[in-house]
């Protein structure tokens, strides 16, 4: 297939594009190369992708003409929208970047999809949309009306816009919700990257929520496998899949639209996660316990039964193996010796 992927210089977009290319698909990547973190890391990812049948366009989501031109020239059958301004904490510092990229940028791409009528449009959302929801594990049928960060609010907005376009223009659309993705080539602003970097340089690490937080960590290869499998599962309006065991399909009654959690449903405590890193590095971290930051939640915990019912699989990678893979990559990237 021809697949248009936004955010291919990013952590998840890079891994997805590489998997699709290895599977023999033709991929066009679209990325604004913003300086939110190290541009050299982004360029190194793209360099690897150029070893395949890959075309890259460097432009912003806010540039409607560039989007229209790229998609019009490529005519993909599938669009995967991963590009976004990410990060809960940064949304406190620069909220305008989230409105611009995540709301305006998503609208622009939906307008392109409206004209193209792809076989499947897939949108990257986040577990953050569950916000103040107290029920766990998080199910796609739970309310997502109480976002506690602007980042979450913009992603909730993206899901809603996708649903309206899906309803109005009959675009089969899947919104997948990510849960704390980690692995090689990860973002420098994420906890695993920061912890490894600081432990190796004997710098104290800040542990928010006094280490009492729990996260449903999802290894990058497991996440990508879920996305690839979902590409072949476009929803049909009002048509729930036949599921036994009480699994609820989130398909819309008025649109070919569905939301799906991609996670293993096995949350791990933050201190346990840090202990795994310490064990892999052979060093103890100096921990500075900090209060909860605004916009954070105490725990994330996914109900992955819908993903399993749709695709026959769910993330199952172990934290030990995932942390080891990241540390091995990090040592190579930073040229840090054993």
Image: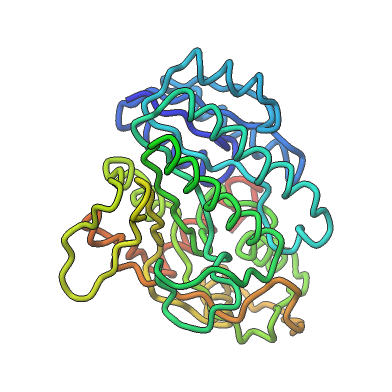
Q: Residue at (44%, 69%) from the top-left corner?
A: 319
Judge whether 66 appears above or below 228 on screen: above
- For residue 25, what is the image quadrant? top left
Q: Position of residue 96 (x, y in %)?
A: 80, 49
In the picture, the quarter occupied by the N terminus is top left
Q: Position of residue 285 (x, y in %)?
A: 68, 77
In the picture, the quarter occupied by the C terminus is bottom right
Residue at the far right in the pictured view: 93
- For residue 104, what is the image quadrant? top right
Q: Is residue 275 visible?
A: no
Q: Which of these two is toward me, 116 or 273? A: 116
Q: Is residue 132 visible?
A: yes
Answer with left or right where residue 97 lies relative to residue 73.
Answer: right
Q: Position of residue 331 (x, y in %)?
A: 59, 52
Q: Residue at (58%, 76%) from the top-left corner?
A: 274
Q: Residue at (58%, 66%) from the top-left corner?
A: 128
Residue at the far top in the pictured view: 73
Q: Which of these two is toward me, 162 or 273? A: 162
Q: Position of residue 238 (x, y in %)?
A: 28, 53
Judge whether 204 appears above or below 49 on screen: below
Answer with left or right where residue 153 lies relative to residue 201.
Answer: left
């Amino acid at each position: 297939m021809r697949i248009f992927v936004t955010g291919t210089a990013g952590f998840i977009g890079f891994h997805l594009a590489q998997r699709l290319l290895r599977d023999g698909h033709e991929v066009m990547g679209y990325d604004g190369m913003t300086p939110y973190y190290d541009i050299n890391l982004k360029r190194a990812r793209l360099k690897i992708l150029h070893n395949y049948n890959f075309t890259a366009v460097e432009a912003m989501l806010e540039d409607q003409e560039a989007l229209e031109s790229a998609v019009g020239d490529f005519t993909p059958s599938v669009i995967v929208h991963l590009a976004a301004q990410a990060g809960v904490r940064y949304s406190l510092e620069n909220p305008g970047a989230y409105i611009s990229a995540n709301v305006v940028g998503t609208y622009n791409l939906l307008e392109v999809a409206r004209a193209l009528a792809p076989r499947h449009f897939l949108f990257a959302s986040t577990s953050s949309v569950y916000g103040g929801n107290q029920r766990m594990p998080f199910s796609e049928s739970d309310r997502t009306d109480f976002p506690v960060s602007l980042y979450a609010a913009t992603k909730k907005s993206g899901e809603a816009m996708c649903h309206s376009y899906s309803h109005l223009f009959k675009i089969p659309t899947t919104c997948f919700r990510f849960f704390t993705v980690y692995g090689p080539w990860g973002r420098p602003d994420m906890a695993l990257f920061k912890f490894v970097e600081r432990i190796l340089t004997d710098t104290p690490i800040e542990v928010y929520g006094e280490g009492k937080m729990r996260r449903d960590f999802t290894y990058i290869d497991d996440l990508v496998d879920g996305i690839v499998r979902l590409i072949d599962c476009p929803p049909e309006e009002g048509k729930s899949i036949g599921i036994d065991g009480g699994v609820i399909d989130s398909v819309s009654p008025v649109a070919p639209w569905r939301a799906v959690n991609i996670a293993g449903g096995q949350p791990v405590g933050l201190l346990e996660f840090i202990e795994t890193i310490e064990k892999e590095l052979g060093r103890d971290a100096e921990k500075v316990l900090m209060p909860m930051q605004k916009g954070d939640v105490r725990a994330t915990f996914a109900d992955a039964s819908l993903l399993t019912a749709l695709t026959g699989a769910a993330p199952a990678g172990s934290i030990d193996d995932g942390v080891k893979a990241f540390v091995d990559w990090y040592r190579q990237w930073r040229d840090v010796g054993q």
